[in-house]
Image (cartoon, grey):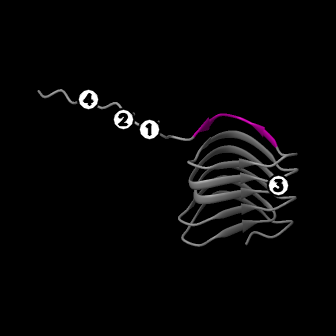
Amino acid sequence: MIGPGTTIRGNIAGEEDLVVEGRVEGAVRLTKDLTVAEGATVEAEVEARAVRVGGRFAGTLDAGDSLVVEAGAVFVGDVKTPRLQIADGAHFKGKVDMDFELPGETKKRDDRRR
């Protein structure tokens, strides 16, 4: 946990869940979950399994499982995730890539043989 009143600038990497109650600036790479608590700020490039934003987030996000933006939270940036939930009262500005295929559709690939 990064407590209230604590600011981290730089890179964070880990294999545990991380709860931010303070401020993080830089890059965050987690194999598990990230929670940005109410009152917290994360300005970073983030990769994590699941992300829950209750405070402020600015940057780019690759959430392998899901992103939840809670009521009153602010999310500014681009996100790639298969599941997205934005609560009523949340603020969201950015691009979303859910990287999915419609039924019967296949991803384009180059099948040419040389």
Q: Earlier in the sequence, mark 1 or mark 3?
A: 3
> Answer yes or no: do the residues labelled 4 and 1 have beta carbons within 8 Å?
no
| Main secondary structure along the magenta-highlighted residues | strand
Which residue is identified by label 4?
A: 110
In three-dimensional space, the C-alpha distance between marks 1 and 3, rounded to whole angstroms, equals 36 Å
Residue 7 coordinates in the image, percent (x, y): 78, 61
Provide the secondary structure element on which disc 3 rests: loop
Q: Name the quadrant of the C terminus.
A: top left
Q: Nearer the viewer, residue 69 or 2?
A: 69
Between label 2 and label 1, give the one nearer the viewer: 1
Is residue 5 inside the magenta stretch?
no
The label number, if any, that marks residue 55 in the structure image? 3
In three-dimensional space, the C-alpha distance between marks 2 and 1, rounded to whole angstroms, equals 8 Å
Provide the secondary structure element on which disc 1 rests: loop
In three-dimensional space, the C-alpha distance between marks 4 and 1, rounded to whole angstroms, equals 20 Å
Classify 52 as above or below 17: above
Provide the secondary structure element on which disc 4 rests: loop
Between label 4 and label 1, give the one nearer the viewer: 1
In three-dimensional space, the C-alpha distance between marks 4 and 3, rounded to whole angstroms, equals 43 Å
